[in-house]
Image (spheres, rainbow, N blue to C red):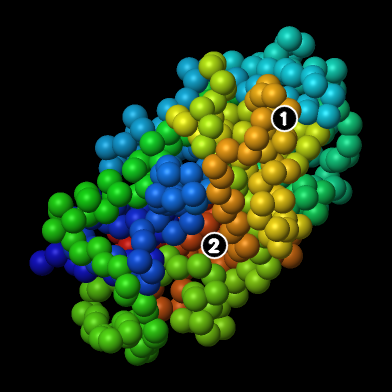
Amino acid sequence: MQKNVHIIGAGISGLSAAVRLANAGYRVHVHEATQQFGGRCRSYFDGATNLTIDNGNHLLLSGNSHALAYAKSIGTEAGLVGPKRAQFPFADISTGQRWLLDLGESRLPLWVFDEARRVPDTSLLDYLALMPLIWAGTDKLVGKAIRCEGTLYQRLVQPLLLAALNVDPPEGSAGLAGAIVRETLLAGGQACRPLIARDGLSAVLVEPAVKLLQDKGNTVQLGRELRELAITGDRVSELKFVGDAIALGPDDVVVLAVPPRPAAALLPGLKTPSKFRAIVNAHFRYDPPKDSAPILGVVGGLVEWLFAFPQRLSVTISNGDRLVDMPREELALAIWRDVCKAAGLPADLPLPPWQIVRERRATFEATPEQNALRPGPVTSSKNLFLAGDWTDTGLPATIEGSVRSGDRAADLVLAGR
């Protein structure tokens, strides 16, 4: 008989666990409390721009092995597109200077030895000064591990770590920052090629997973809010949803892949991160200039990363708590001014149709204090496992971390843990 596994939550963590277990022959039941799949990683039609936009602009890299394996398992690896070489154009809109960071195609960080491929006005010694991050513990601050100043920091390290940690880098966990550096800059260009879901996150990472699960005869349901995990002895014995309940058999397993707040409510005594930071995304209906880079790093202004999509320019601003209460039109106009500078558009170009998306609790604070509150996948109940980018994945809250957590929970189920 097929074994049953109940996945609570249909974000990327839950879906990756569900796909892995369905492909291994389990009978999978996915229960999502809201009315949409994908969690914070989803697309939707926006009436203000008359375009399908993503809830947030997410960048993957060619070295994100778990995320790419997940995409391959649902048949959408080709939907993640990017340049053939790991190159990142940057623009300093305060000075007008532009440069290209060229990480090449090697498995080693050989680019740091080539002045033409490095950040302008930096030396090899500047990069060697980042080495303490590589072996730093998660309880150490970035600001205590490296000097958070200078040309290399301002033009590369600060933008990279800000995007990854979603906190001002000096206050972030050096261990988490080191994990990012090891898997990107230190891994060479072969691991750093940027990949974007050009047709939208839902079309590439969410909807095909739901279809695969359904085609295999599994159930994926929306509007299924779990109110209680009934525990008998050392096992979850019943799932109590709003409106009904499911009694679990002796071999049934549960993967809880919900955000930290509902997870703590369902499992009293569970330690979870308690502080979060916002991310602000802006979308403008405007055809990108010809030959625009898919992604442009921006320094010297409000904007941090500029994405060029068909018919749309989109922006991401991390650590955005300072912007969540700013009047929307005022914020859109301020961002658009930066976009015009970065994209080389006329400064007086009127504001096109736009949308601002503010995720107030986008990620947990990637500080040593909050990282110490992240639980592992195993619980005191033998048939209950945790997944989510807020669990202890060894990475900050990223898509790669989400998929890794789902894979890890699934692997524990498969190992009979």
Residue 340: which disc? none
Which residue is depicted at the point 28% across and 42% down?
Answer: 74
| Type of amino acid at the residue the image marks with label 1 | Asp
Give how far across and how far down residue 208 sits, in percent.
28, 46
**Front residue (pair 161, 37):** 37
Give how far across and how far down residue 335 sits, in percent.
69, 42
Q: In this rendering, is residue 57 above or below 220? A: above
Q: Residue furthest left?
A: 1
Decide which of tag 2 and tag 1 comes sooner along the chain.
1
| Type of amino acid at the residue the image marks with label 2 | Thr
Please indicate whether residue 224 sits to the left or right of residue 348 in the image.
left
Classify residue 94 by image quadrant: top right
| Mark 1, other Cα within 10 Å: few <14 / some 14–19 / many ≥20 | few
Which residue is depicted at the point 30% across and 57% down?
Answer: 18
Please indicate whether residue 32 sits to the left or right of residue 391 in the image.
left
Q: In this rendering, is residue 49 above or below 276? A: above
Give how far across and how far down residue 244 sits, in percent.
25, 86
Residue 138 visible, this orientation: no
Q: Which residue is mark 2?
A: 391
Please indicate whether residue 95 sits to the left or right of residue 253 in the image.
right
Q: Which residue is mark 1?
A: 348
Give how far across and how far down residue 159 sits, in percent.
72, 37
Dots 2, 1 in contact, CB < 8 A: no
| Mark 2, other Cα within 10 Å: few <14 / some 14–19 / many ≥20 | many
